Amino acid sequence: MLVAQKAQAEPLWTPVMGASVLFAPITRPMLRRARRAALEALGTDGAEGGETASVTEQMEELGDALSFALIVAGVLDWRDVCVMADDDDTGTGVPLECTDENKAMLLADPLTFEAFDAAYVIPFVQRERERAAPGKESSPSQDGISTQATGERIIAGSPAPLATATDAPNAPTSSTKRRPKPKKTSGTS
């Protein structure tokens, strides 16, 4: 059965590294634009010459470029994001305006990029993977048996101890001897 899901209607404030970031819901057009940007980034990296990257490296670069494009398109605003006035991070920070240039500057730091990716892109990808899993006929149930609903371990941590023959009493059984059948007398019908 195909189950339609309501789209996230409004942008959502999400905590990221001590700041609050307003993320737009990821839409299909946004995802298509991010895919195009990722392919363009891979094409420009490959056109620089030198060695051809392995397939694994190319996939990682595609993933990073896709995430970068989705984050830049999805971040609508932020609070408590600043740039330090001096390089030793001891002074008070200057609030940073939410612009594409500042987003790129912020995402240039690998730790910040990973935090934004974990807060925004990875949850979307996980939902899409679960929806498209082989044999999956419907979307995840919030209160069912999907991995989203059963995040905590609810099964036994170890097996029950084995019982021995002396632990339990014998079960009562009826006699297994055959009862004699009454003999038929001959000549009578």
Image (cartoon, rainbow, N blue to C red):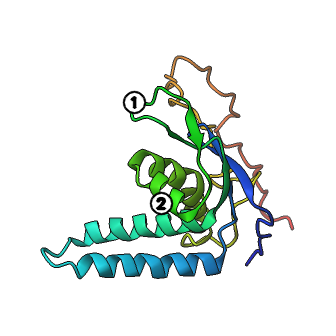
168 or 49: which is nearer to us?
A: 49
Q: Is residue 147 left or right of residue 89?
A: right
- Which residue in the rendered view is the most extreme toward the right? 189
The residue at which mark 2 appears reads as 104
Residue 47: image location, x then y, percent: 23, 82
Q: Tell me: 60 left or right of 51.
A: right
Closer-to-camera residue (100/5): 100
Q: Amino acid at mark 1?
A: Asp
Q: Pointer 1: what residue?
A: 88
Vertical placement of residue 189 versus 98, above or below? below
Quarter of the figure with residue 45: bottom left
Q: Is residue 67 above or below residue 153?
A: below
| SS type, badge 2 | helix
In the displayed structure, 54 sits above or below 88; it is below
Amino acid found under the numbered disc labelled 2 = Ala
One can see residue 163 in this view: yes
Instruction: Indicate the quadrant containing the C terminus: top left, top right, bottom left or bottom right.
Output: bottom right
Of tags 2 and 1, which is closer to the observer?
A: 1
Residue 49 is situated, as x and y percent measured from the top left of the image, at 16, 79
Residue at x-position 43% and y-position 34%: 86
Q: Residue at x 69, y 28 (%)?
A: 172
Q: Mark 2 or mark 1, which has the lower sequence index?
A: 1
* For residue 157, above or below residue 118: above
Q: Is residue 21 visible?
A: no
The outermost residue toward the top is: 166
